[in-house]
Amino acid sequence: MNPIGGSSLPACSSVLGRAFAISAILAMFIGNAVAQNCSLDTIVHITDKNNQPVANVNAADLKAEIGGTPANITSLSLTKPAIVLVLDTSPSMKQTWDQAIAAAKQFVEKTEDVGLFTFREKVLGYAIGRVKSEEMLDQLAKQGPSPLGSGGTALYDTLIELGSHLKTHNAALVLISDGGDNQSTHTSEATALLFERSSWPPVFALILDYKETDKSRGYFKKIPAATGGMIIYPSSASKVPAAADQLAGIILNSFVLSLQAPESRTDMAKLKLESARKDINLLHVSEVPPCGPVH
């Protein structure tokens, strides 16, 4: 059943293709990495030592290497990416449901360029835009999470399904979940590798488990780390609102970093970014795509 009302959802791939086509901000933004041009764009998030967003950074503050060779940074400009909210509605979310819904509403309130997707063992429903997302969240608040016995959680497979349908890197997948997965056909390692090799958008997460020793953290954290994203773990229900605001602030103060590669490549290459400034942290993809010769 589609949580936003109406008839049952068609096949997942059809739903996602149609949903992403609705939002203009999710149109093509692949940078300049084409066969005749060895320049490329990548998204970077910059925070201070308290993980608060930093905007007063320029290209001269950074140094880049691609595959161990210095690369020229041609520009660094602020951008406001689309937010793709990914809300876990599996039975394990029962104890944190109210906080999950409230956090999702915080994200939706901050931008018009937002889409909301719910999942359990697969993507269950979606809403595009602020108004539709708010309506869907109001309905979900009344429904509650899925009842026990209604299915498992395919977190990794859901991220792959969504990432594969995004034709832009100027977006952020924002997961609200307890981080558990008991039904995906992909491992966390395989998921992280797919995101790296496919240049899909970064994955951010608000993990509501309130357990510092939860073993699932060790698996899931590989995905945001590989994609240039970030995880925040609120230590209690009362800390969730501030954590959601903090994560939204980082995501919505993103930078497009334009690089000139020193030579053509046919394979993925490691990206290394550094700064002489000791007051900032850099979040970025671990690898960049192949790059053809400059003409």
Image: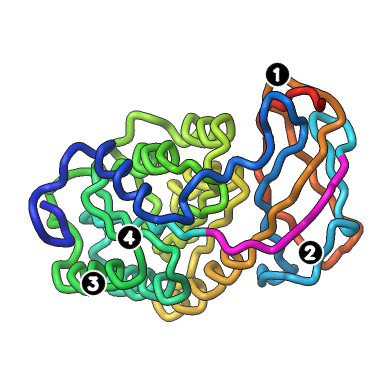
Is the C-beta separation of discs 3 and 1 under 8 Å? no
Q: Amino acid at mark 4?
A: Ile
Q: Nearer the viewer's eye, disc 2 or disc 1?
A: 1
Q: Nearer the viewer, mark 3 or mark 2?
A: 3
Of helix, strand and loop, which one carries label 3?
helix
The 10 Å Cα crowd at callout 4, few under 14, some 14 to 19, many 20 or more, is: many
Q: Is residue 275 above or below residue 49?
A: above
Disc on res. 22 = none
Of pointers 3 and 4, the one earlier in the residue sequence: 4
SS category of the residue bearing label 1: loop
Give the residue displayed 74% in from the left and 51% down from the top.
257
Q: Which of these two is toward me, 7 or 268?
A: 7
Furthest residue in direction top, as rendered: 266
Q: Which residue is mark 4?
A: 128
Neighbours of disc 1 within 10 Å: few (<14), some (14-19), many (20+): few
Q: Residue at x 81, y 27 (%)?
A: 294
Query: Mark 3 to mark 4: distance in Å?
Result: 11 Å
Residue, disc 3: 135
* Residue type pointed to by label 3: Glu
The amino acid pointed to by label 1 is: Thr
Q: Earlier along the polypeptide chain: callout 4 or callout 2?
A: 4
Which of the two residues, 71 or 186, is positioned nearer the viewer here? Answer: 71
